[in-house]
Amino acid sequence: MRLLRSAQFPAFALIFAAALGLTLANSPLAPTVFALKQLHLGAGAFDMSVGHWVTEGLLAIFFFLAAVELKHELRHGELDSPSKAFVPTLAAIGGVLVPAAIYLLWVPESVRAGWPIPTATDIAFALGVLALVGRALPSSVRALLLAIAVIDDLIAIAIIALLFPGDLVPLALLAAVPVILAFGWVSGRAPSVWRTIALVTMAIGAWALVFISGIHPTIAGVALGLALASPRGERVRFALEPWSNAIVLPLFAFTATLVVIPDFAASPLGPVFFSIAVALPVGKIVGIMGGALIAQKLSGAVREPLANLFVVAALGGIGFTVSLLMNDLAFESDPASLTAGTLGVLGGSLVAACIGGVAGALRSRWYRQRGERT
Protein backbone atom coordinates (compact mmCIF):
# COMPACT_ATOMS: atom_id res chain seq x y z
CA MET A 1 0.00 0.00 0.00
CA ARG A 2 2.94 2.35 0.61
CA LEU A 3 3.80 2.21 -3.10
CA LEU A 4 0.21 3.02 -4.09
CA ARG A 5 0.22 6.05 -1.78
CA SER A 6 3.53 7.38 -3.07
CA ALA A 7 3.49 10.62 -5.05
CA GLN A 8 5.32 9.00 -7.98
CA PHE A 9 2.97 6.05 -8.53
CA PRO A 10 0.02 7.94 -10.11
CA ALA A 11 2.28 9.45 -12.79
CA PHE A 12 3.56 6.04 -13.89
CA ALA A 13 0.09 4.47 -13.66
CA LEU A 14 -1.54 7.20 -15.76
CA ILE A 15 1.17 7.05 -18.45
CA PHE A 16 0.91 3.26 -18.65
CA ALA A 17 -2.92 3.29 -18.78
CA ALA A 18 -2.99 5.99 -21.48
CA ALA A 19 -0.38 4.19 -23.57
CA LEU A 20 -2.29 0.92 -23.23
CA GLY A 21 -5.56 2.59 -24.24
CA LEU A 22 -4.05 4.17 -27.36
CA THR A 23 -2.27 0.93 -28.29
CA LEU A 24 -5.32 -1.30 -27.97
CA ALA A 25 -7.58 1.19 -29.78
CA ASN A 26 -5.25 1.00 -32.78
CA SER A 27 -4.65 -2.76 -32.70
CA PRO A 28 -6.56 -5.81 -34.00
CA LEU A 29 -8.18 -6.01 -30.54
CA ALA A 30 -9.88 -2.64 -31.05
CA PRO A 31 -13.39 -4.00 -31.89
CA THR A 32 -13.43 -6.11 -28.73
CA VAL A 33 -12.16 -3.28 -26.52
CA PHE A 34 -14.66 -0.76 -27.92
CA ALA A 35 -17.47 -3.31 -27.51
CA LEU A 36 -16.55 -3.72 -23.84
CA LYS A 37 -16.47 0.06 -23.35
CA GLN A 38 -19.95 0.35 -24.88
CA LEU A 39 -21.36 -2.63 -22.96
CA HIS A 40 -24.37 -1.48 -20.92
CA LEU A 41 -24.77 -2.30 -17.25
CA GLY A 42 -27.51 -1.34 -14.82
CA ALA A 43 -31.22 -0.76 -15.27
CA GLY A 44 -33.68 2.09 -15.75
CA ALA A 45 -32.18 5.53 -15.25
CA PHE A 46 -28.89 3.87 -14.30
CA ASP A 47 -28.52 1.86 -17.52
CA MET A 48 -25.13 3.13 -18.72
CA SER A 49 -22.19 1.93 -20.75
CA VAL A 50 -19.03 0.79 -18.98
CA GLY A 51 -17.36 3.99 -20.22
CA HIS A 52 -20.02 6.15 -18.60
CA TRP A 53 -19.87 4.17 -15.36
CA VAL A 54 -16.18 4.99 -15.19
CA THR A 55 -16.65 8.69 -16.07
CA GLU A 56 -19.76 9.34 -14.00
CA GLY A 57 -19.38 6.74 -11.27
CA LEU A 58 -15.80 5.85 -10.40
CA LEU A 59 -14.47 9.33 -11.19
CA ALA A 60 -16.72 10.73 -8.45
CA ILE A 61 -14.35 9.00 -6.00
CA PHE A 62 -11.41 10.99 -7.40
CA PHE A 63 -13.33 14.27 -7.05
CA PHE A 64 -14.41 13.24 -3.54
CA LEU A 65 -10.77 12.83 -2.52
CA ALA A 66 -9.84 16.11 -4.25
CA ALA A 67 -12.54 17.88 -2.21
CA VAL A 68 -11.28 16.31 1.03
CA GLU A 69 -7.79 17.61 0.19
CA LEU A 70 -9.20 21.04 -0.66
CA LYS A 71 -10.99 21.19 2.70
CA HIS A 72 -7.78 20.26 4.50
CA GLU A 73 -5.83 22.97 2.65
CA LEU A 74 -8.54 25.54 3.47
CA ARG A 75 -8.46 24.68 7.17
CA HIS A 76 -4.92 23.64 7.96
CA GLY A 77 -2.77 23.98 4.85
CA GLU A 78 -1.55 26.43 2.24
CA LEU A 79 -4.98 28.08 1.81
CA ASP A 80 -5.94 28.55 5.46
CA SER A 81 -5.80 32.36 5.33
CA PRO A 82 -6.56 34.99 2.67
CA SER A 83 -2.91 36.11 2.61
CA LYS A 84 -1.68 32.56 1.97
CA ALA A 85 -4.32 31.88 -0.65
CA PHE A 86 -3.85 35.10 -2.64
CA VAL A 87 -0.76 34.09 -4.66
CA PRO A 88 -1.92 30.58 -5.69
CA THR A 89 -5.45 31.86 -6.34
CA LEU A 90 -4.33 34.57 -8.75
CA ALA A 91 -1.82 32.15 -10.31
CA ALA A 92 -4.57 29.54 -10.81
CA ILE A 93 -6.93 32.13 -12.33
CA GLY A 94 -4.19 33.22 -14.73
CA GLY A 95 -3.60 29.54 -15.52
CA VAL A 96 -7.25 29.22 -16.51
CA LEU A 97 -7.73 32.48 -18.43
CA VAL A 98 -4.64 32.40 -20.67
CA PRO A 99 -5.06 28.79 -21.97
CA ALA A 100 -8.77 29.45 -22.57
CA ALA A 101 -7.91 32.63 -24.51
CA ILE A 102 -5.33 30.78 -26.64
CA TYR A 103 -7.90 28.11 -27.46
CA LEU A 104 -10.66 30.60 -28.33
CA LEU A 105 -8.34 32.69 -30.52
CA TRP A 106 -7.23 29.60 -32.46
CA VAL A 107 -10.40 27.60 -33.19
CA PRO A 108 -13.50 28.29 -35.32
CA GLU A 109 -16.80 29.04 -33.65
CA SER A 110 -18.16 25.52 -34.23
CA VAL A 111 -15.78 23.98 -31.67
CA ARG A 112 -15.50 26.81 -29.14
CA ALA A 113 -17.33 24.70 -26.56
CA GLY A 114 -13.97 23.04 -25.92
CA TRP A 115 -12.39 26.11 -24.31
CA PRO A 116 -12.39 24.57 -20.78
CA ILE A 117 -10.23 21.61 -21.91
CA PRO A 118 -6.78 23.26 -21.56
CA THR A 119 -7.66 25.08 -18.33
CA ALA A 120 -7.24 22.07 -16.01
CA THR A 121 -4.27 20.80 -14.00
CA ASP A 122 -3.95 17.14 -12.98
CA ILE A 123 -3.02 17.11 -9.27
CA ALA A 124 -1.81 13.52 -9.11
CA PHE A 125 0.21 13.60 -12.33
CA ALA A 126 1.81 17.01 -11.70
CA LEU A 127 2.81 16.17 -8.12
CA GLY A 128 4.04 12.76 -9.29
CA VAL A 129 6.44 14.31 -11.81
CA LEU A 130 7.64 16.82 -9.22
CA ALA A 131 8.29 13.99 -6.75
CA LEU A 132 10.31 12.14 -9.38
CA VAL A 133 12.62 15.00 -10.35
CA GLY A 134 12.51 17.59 -7.58
CA ARG A 135 13.59 15.89 -4.38
CA ALA A 136 16.04 18.65 -3.47
CA LEU A 137 13.57 21.48 -4.16
CA PRO A 138 12.28 23.44 -1.16
CA SER A 139 8.90 22.39 0.25
CA SER A 140 7.43 25.73 -0.84
CA VAL A 141 7.54 24.59 -4.49
CA ARG A 142 5.37 21.53 -3.83
CA ALA A 143 3.06 23.56 -1.58
CA LEU A 144 2.55 26.19 -4.29
CA LEU A 145 1.93 23.57 -7.00
CA LEU A 146 -0.53 21.73 -4.75
CA ALA A 147 -2.41 24.92 -3.88
CA ILE A 148 -2.65 26.02 -7.53
CA ALA A 149 -3.80 22.56 -8.63
CA VAL A 150 -6.45 22.38 -5.89
CA ILE A 151 -7.84 25.83 -6.77
CA ASP A 152 -7.69 24.89 -10.45
CA ASP A 153 -9.77 21.78 -9.72
CA LEU A 154 -12.29 23.91 -7.82
CA ILE A 155 -12.64 26.12 -10.90
CA ALA A 156 -12.97 23.01 -13.09
CA ILE A 157 -15.75 21.71 -10.84
CA ALA A 158 -17.62 25.02 -11.20
CA ILE A 159 -17.19 24.87 -14.98
CA ILE A 160 -18.56 21.33 -15.12
CA ALA A 161 -21.56 22.28 -12.98
CA LEU A 162 -22.37 25.44 -14.96
CA LEU A 163 -21.56 24.49 -18.56
CA PHE A 164 -22.28 20.79 -18.80
CA PRO A 165 -25.62 20.11 -17.08
CA GLY A 166 -28.05 17.59 -18.49
CA ASP A 167 -31.82 17.96 -18.41
CA LEU A 168 -32.20 19.46 -14.96
CA VAL A 169 -34.59 17.72 -12.51
CA PRO A 170 -34.79 20.24 -9.62
CA LEU A 171 -36.61 17.93 -7.20
CA ALA A 172 -33.85 15.31 -7.35
CA LEU A 173 -31.21 18.00 -6.80
CA LEU A 174 -33.14 19.42 -3.83
CA ALA A 175 -33.52 15.92 -2.39
CA ALA A 176 -29.74 15.43 -2.56
CA VAL A 177 -29.09 18.43 -0.29
CA PRO A 178 -30.44 16.96 3.00
CA VAL A 179 -28.74 13.64 2.23
CA ILE A 180 -25.37 15.40 1.85
CA LEU A 181 -25.97 17.46 5.02
CA ALA A 182 -26.90 14.30 6.93
CA PHE A 183 -23.74 12.65 5.58
CA GLY A 184 -21.67 15.49 7.01
CA TRP A 185 -23.46 15.34 10.38
CA VAL A 186 -23.08 11.57 10.77
CA SER A 187 -19.41 11.74 9.73
CA GLY A 188 -18.76 14.01 12.72
CA ARG A 189 -20.07 11.43 15.21
CA ALA A 190 -17.91 8.77 16.86
CA PRO A 191 -17.01 6.10 14.30
CA SER A 192 -18.77 2.72 14.39
CA VAL A 193 -19.60 -0.05 11.95
CA TRP A 194 -23.23 1.06 11.66
CA ARG A 195 -22.25 4.69 11.06
CA THR A 196 -19.82 3.60 8.36
CA ILE A 197 -22.57 1.60 6.65
CA ALA A 198 -24.88 4.62 6.95
CA LEU A 199 -22.25 6.92 5.42
CA VAL A 200 -21.65 4.61 2.46
CA THR A 201 -25.42 4.30 1.92
CA MET A 202 -25.93 8.08 2.05
CA ALA A 203 -22.98 8.67 -0.29
CA ILE A 204 -24.43 6.30 -2.88
CA GLY A 205 -27.87 7.88 -2.42
CA ALA A 206 -26.48 11.40 -2.88
CA TRP A 207 -24.60 10.32 -6.01
CA ALA A 208 -27.77 8.70 -7.42
CA LEU A 209 -29.91 11.80 -6.76
CA VAL A 210 -27.36 14.15 -8.34
CA PHE A 211 -27.12 11.79 -11.33
CA ILE A 212 -30.92 11.81 -11.75
CA SER A 213 -30.98 15.61 -11.35
CA GLY A 214 -29.00 16.05 -14.59
CA ILE A 215 -25.94 17.59 -12.91
CA HIS A 216 -22.73 15.69 -13.65
CA PRO A 217 -22.51 13.22 -10.72
CA THR A 218 -18.85 13.97 -9.99
CA ILE A 219 -20.28 17.10 -8.34
CA ALA A 220 -21.81 14.77 -5.73
CA GLY A 221 -18.30 13.56 -4.91
CA VAL A 222 -17.17 17.14 -4.41
CA ALA A 223 -20.11 18.01 -2.16
CA LEU A 224 -19.63 14.87 -0.05
CA GLY A 225 -15.89 15.54 0.29
CA LEU A 226 -16.51 19.08 1.50
CA ALA A 227 -19.26 17.91 3.89
CA LEU A 228 -17.16 15.13 5.44
CA ALA A 229 -15.95 16.00 8.94
CA SER A 230 -12.22 16.81 8.90
CA PRO A 231 -10.86 14.13 11.28
CA ARG A 232 -12.72 11.35 9.50
CA GLY A 233 -11.89 12.92 6.13
CA GLU A 234 -8.18 12.35 6.62
CA ARG A 235 -8.78 8.70 7.59
CA VAL A 236 -11.09 8.13 4.62
CA ARG A 237 -8.62 9.76 2.26
CA PHE A 238 -5.82 7.58 3.64
CA ALA A 239 -7.95 4.47 3.06
CA LEU A 240 -9.25 5.34 -0.42
CA GLU A 241 -6.21 7.03 -1.98
CA PRO A 242 -4.44 3.77 -2.96
CA TRP A 243 -7.57 2.50 -4.73
CA SER A 244 -8.02 5.81 -6.52
CA ASN A 245 -4.37 5.81 -7.63
CA ALA A 246 -4.34 2.16 -8.66
CA ILE A 247 -7.82 1.69 -10.15
CA VAL A 248 -9.95 4.83 -10.60
CA LEU A 249 -7.46 7.14 -12.31
CA PRO A 250 -5.77 4.51 -14.54
CA LEU A 251 -9.15 3.05 -15.57
CA PHE A 252 -10.41 6.51 -16.51
CA ALA A 253 -7.18 7.28 -18.41
CA PHE A 254 -7.50 3.95 -20.23
CA THR A 255 -11.12 4.46 -21.31
CA ALA A 256 -10.59 8.15 -22.19
CA THR A 257 -7.65 7.35 -24.48
CA LEU A 258 -9.43 4.61 -26.40
CA VAL A 259 -9.30 6.65 -29.61
CA VAL A 260 -8.33 5.64 -33.11
CA ILE A 261 -5.42 7.75 -34.32
CA PRO A 262 -6.49 9.17 -37.69
CA ASP A 263 -4.53 9.00 -40.92
CA PHE A 264 -2.80 12.36 -40.73
CA ALA A 265 -2.09 12.36 -44.49
CA ALA A 266 -5.78 11.99 -45.33
CA SER A 267 -7.11 13.97 -42.37
CA PRO A 268 -4.56 16.46 -40.95
CA LEU A 269 -4.87 17.40 -37.31
CA GLY A 270 -6.96 20.54 -37.05
CA PRO A 271 -7.18 23.55 -34.77
CA VAL A 272 -8.70 21.65 -31.83
CA PHE A 273 -5.57 19.51 -31.52
CA PHE A 274 -3.06 22.32 -31.98
CA SER A 275 -4.87 24.82 -29.75
CA ILE A 276 -5.00 22.38 -26.84
CA ALA A 277 -1.47 21.07 -27.42
CA VAL A 278 -0.15 24.65 -27.27
CA ALA A 279 -2.53 26.10 -24.68
CA LEU A 280 -1.68 23.51 -22.01
CA PRO A 281 2.10 24.02 -21.80
CA VAL A 282 2.44 27.59 -23.10
CA GLY A 283 -0.80 29.02 -21.73
CA LYS A 284 -0.23 27.57 -18.27
CA ILE A 285 3.36 28.82 -18.09
CA VAL A 286 2.35 32.34 -19.10
CA GLY A 287 -0.85 32.41 -17.05
CA ILE A 288 0.46 30.87 -13.82
CA MET A 289 3.72 32.83 -13.80
CA GLY A 290 1.96 36.07 -14.69
CA GLY A 291 -0.71 35.61 -12.03
CA ALA A 292 1.84 34.66 -9.36
CA LEU A 293 4.12 37.61 -10.12
CA ILE A 294 1.22 40.08 -10.04
CA ALA A 295 -0.02 38.60 -6.74
CA GLN A 296 3.43 38.73 -5.17
CA LYS A 297 3.80 42.37 -6.14
CA LEU A 298 0.33 43.36 -4.90
CA SER A 299 0.49 41.45 -1.62
CA GLY A 300 4.15 41.84 -0.71
CA ALA A 301 4.28 38.08 -0.09
CA VAL A 302 7.59 36.24 0.09
CA ARG A 303 8.80 36.01 -3.50
CA GLU A 304 9.37 32.55 -4.91
CA PRO A 305 12.40 32.59 -7.26
CA LEU A 306 11.49 32.87 -10.94
CA ALA A 307 13.11 29.52 -11.71
CA ASN A 308 10.90 27.82 -9.10
CA LEU A 309 7.80 29.55 -10.45
CA PHE A 310 8.68 28.29 -13.92
CA VAL A 311 8.84 24.70 -12.64
CA VAL A 312 5.42 25.05 -10.98
CA ALA A 313 3.88 26.75 -14.04
CA ALA A 314 5.21 24.16 -16.47
CA LEU A 315 3.95 21.24 -14.37
CA GLY A 316 0.61 23.05 -14.13
CA GLY A 317 0.26 22.39 -17.86
CA ILE A 318 -0.26 18.67 -17.22
CA GLY A 319 -4.00 18.59 -17.74
CA PHE A 320 -4.60 14.87 -18.29
CA THR A 321 -7.43 13.49 -16.07
CA VAL A 322 -9.59 16.60 -15.70
CA SER A 323 -8.78 17.85 -19.23
CA LEU A 324 -9.82 14.47 -20.67
CA LEU A 325 -13.07 14.68 -18.69
CA MET A 326 -13.70 18.20 -20.04
CA ASN A 327 -12.96 16.89 -23.54
CA ASP A 328 -15.49 14.07 -23.14
CA LEU A 329 -18.15 16.51 -21.94
CA ALA A 330 -17.48 19.21 -24.56
CA PHE A 331 -17.31 16.92 -27.61
CA GLU A 332 -19.55 14.02 -26.60
CA SER A 333 -21.54 14.34 -29.83
CA ASP A 334 -18.60 15.24 -32.08
CA PRO A 335 -16.35 12.17 -32.54
CA ALA A 336 -13.78 13.94 -34.76
CA SER A 337 -13.26 16.77 -32.29
CA LEU A 338 -13.28 14.27 -29.41
CA THR A 339 -10.38 12.38 -30.99
CA ALA A 340 -8.47 15.59 -31.80
CA GLY A 341 -9.06 16.89 -28.28
CA THR A 342 -7.87 13.65 -26.66
CA LEU A 343 -4.67 13.67 -28.73
CA GLY A 344 -4.21 17.38 -27.95
CA VAL A 345 -4.52 16.74 -24.20
CA LEU A 346 -2.05 13.86 -24.39
CA GLY A 347 0.41 15.84 -26.51
CA GLY A 348 0.15 19.05 -24.50
CA SER A 349 0.40 17.23 -21.17
CA LEU A 350 3.44 15.28 -22.38
CA VAL A 351 5.18 18.49 -23.50
CA ALA A 352 4.35 20.17 -20.18
CA ALA A 353 5.62 17.13 -18.24
CA CYS A 354 8.90 17.16 -20.21
CA ILE A 355 9.44 20.91 -19.77
CA GLY A 356 8.51 20.84 -16.10
CA GLY A 357 10.45 17.64 -15.47
CA VAL A 358 13.66 18.95 -17.04
CA ALA A 359 13.32 22.34 -15.34
CA GLY A 360 12.57 20.66 -12.00
CA ALA A 361 15.55 18.31 -12.32
CA LEU A 362 17.92 21.18 -13.17
CA ARG A 363 16.60 23.32 -10.34
CA SER A 364 16.81 20.39 -7.92
CA ARG A 365 20.44 19.79 -8.93
CA TRP A 366 21.18 23.48 -8.32
CA TYR A 367 19.80 23.26 -4.77
CA ARG A 368 21.67 20.01 -4.14
CA GLN A 369 24.99 21.46 -5.34
CA ARG A 370 24.47 24.60 -3.28
CA GLY A 371 23.80 22.44 -0.22
CA GLU A 372 26.98 20.45 -0.83
CA ARG A 373 29.05 23.65 -1.06
CA THR A 374 27.72 25.15 2.17
Image: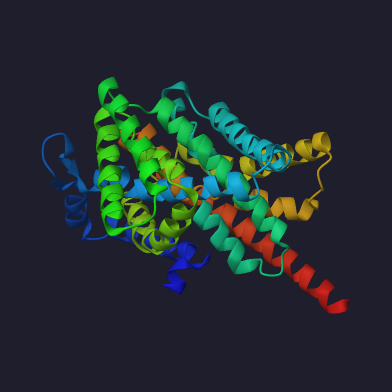
Which color scheme is applied? rainbow
- Total numbered labels placed on residues in the image: 0
Whole-percent x, y for residue 103 in the image? 54, 32
For the N terminus, the image quarter is bottom left
Task: Say left or right for 373 vs 262.
Answer: right
Whole-percent x, y for residue 90 in the image? 68, 36
314 or 200: nearer the viewer: 200
Toward the front, the furthest residue is: 190
Q: With respect to residue 174, does 49 lie above or below?
A: below
Whole-percent x, y for residue 184 in the image? 40, 42
Query: Residue 218 sits in which quadrant?
Result: top left
Q: With respect to residue 12, does 117 lie above or below?
A: above
> Could you tell me if residue 207 is visible in this image?
yes
Query: Residue 131 sits in which quadrant?
Result: bottom right
> Could you tell me if residue 268 is visible in this image?
no
Q: Which residue is drawn at 25% across and 40% down?
A: 205
Toward the left, the furthest residue is: 43
78 or 119: nearer the viewer: 78
Toward the bottom, the furthest residue is: 372
Whole-percent x, y for residue 322 in the image? 45, 44
Q: With respect to residue 216, does 199 lie above or below?
A: below
Task: Say left or right for 11 vs 79.
Answer: left
Task: Say left or right for 217 vs 94.
Answer: left
Q: Residue at x 52, y 38 (%)?
A: 154
268 or 200: nearer the viewer: 200
For the C terminus, the image quarter is bottom right
369 or 333: nearer the viewer: 369
